[in-house]
Image (spheres, rainbow, N blue to C red):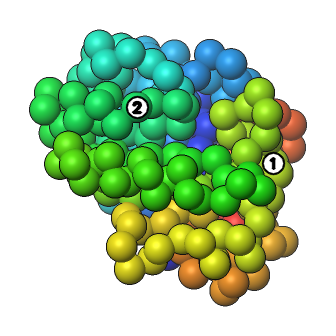
């Protein structure tokens, strides 16, 4: 099970989290969150990571140039697009840099029909998506809400045999992650607020329990 601890924004905490051996850490460049990290600090965090820990840069409606500049400065191999990015932006990223792309999708009561259309668009443009992260849809938020995804709806509608490997997010914490894995069967899991003592403040005991 691939595990990402998201929303690290200082070097000291990142070093302690990495000791617990997650597969990846998330560095959030979206200004509208208490988990935002500066480019300079992100670069310092990445520079000290062991090879086994994958750094993922999280972007929300950033421009192609902003994503390109940040990934180069921080030496990020993977980006997570968590906003309303069109398929064309992914295609442009593919053509400009060698990056793994995780496409985040916010699931609400409307289901995943729009995600099917999105992946059809990716196929038409030859876009490679390494994984799809499913988060809960909350109006006015781009993740980090702590709201749980409807596991039943997700399990019914996600096309496991056709779409990229699924990363489950949204409301996960040490008390429910095992049940979520059993019921949804994701390739990976992602957590931010579920291992925090306050918004943006990671609790290392909770991180350890989650892993």
**Mark closer to the chain start, 1 or 2:** 2
- Residue 204 in view: no
Q: Say whether residue 138 is left or right of residue 191.
A: right
Q: CA distance from mark 1 to mark 2?
A: 25 Å
Residue 90 location in percent, x, y? 30, 35
Q: Quadrant of residue 8?
A: top right
SS label for mark 2: loop
User: Is residue 78 among what the camera can see?
Assistant: yes
Q: Is residue 128 left or right of residue 118?
A: left
The residue where tag 2 is placed is 86
The quarter of the rendered structure image containing the C terminus is bottom right
Residue 191 or 67: which is nearer the viewer? Answer: 67
Q: Bin the neighbour count of mark 2 within 10 Å (Cα to Cα): few under 14, some 14-19, many 20 and up.
A: few
Q: Which mark is residue 146?
A: 1
Element type at mark 1: loop
Q: Which is nearer the eye, 203 or 113?
A: 113
Of labels 1 and 2, the one closer to you: 2
């Amino acid at each position: 099970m691939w595990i990402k601890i998201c929303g690290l924004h200082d070097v000291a905490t990142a070093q302690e989290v990495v000791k617990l051996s997650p597969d990846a850490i998330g560095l959030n460049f979206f200004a509208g969150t208490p988990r935002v990290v500066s480019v300079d600090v992100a670069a310092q965090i990445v520079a000290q990571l062991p090879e086994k820990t994958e750094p993922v840069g999280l972007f929300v409606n950033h421009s192609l140039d902003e994503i390109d500049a940040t990934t180069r400065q921080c030496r990020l191999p993977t980006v997570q697009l968590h906003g309303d990015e069109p398929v064309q932006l992914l295609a442009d990223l593919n053509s400009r840099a060698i990056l793994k792309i995780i496409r985040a999708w916010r699931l609400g009561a409307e289901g995943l029909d729009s995600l099917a259309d999105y992946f059809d668009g990716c196929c038409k443009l030859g876009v490679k998506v390494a994984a799809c992260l499913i988060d809960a849809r909350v109006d006015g938020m781009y993740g980090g809400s702590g709201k749980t995804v409807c596991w039943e709806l997700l399990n019914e509608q996600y096309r496991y045999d056709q779409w990229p490997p699924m990363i489950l997010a949204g409301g996960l914490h040490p008390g429910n992650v095992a049940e979520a894995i059993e019921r949804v069967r994701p390739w990976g899991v992602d957590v931010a607020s579920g291992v925090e003592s306050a918004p943006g403040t990671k609790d290392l005991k909770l991180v350890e329990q989650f892993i």
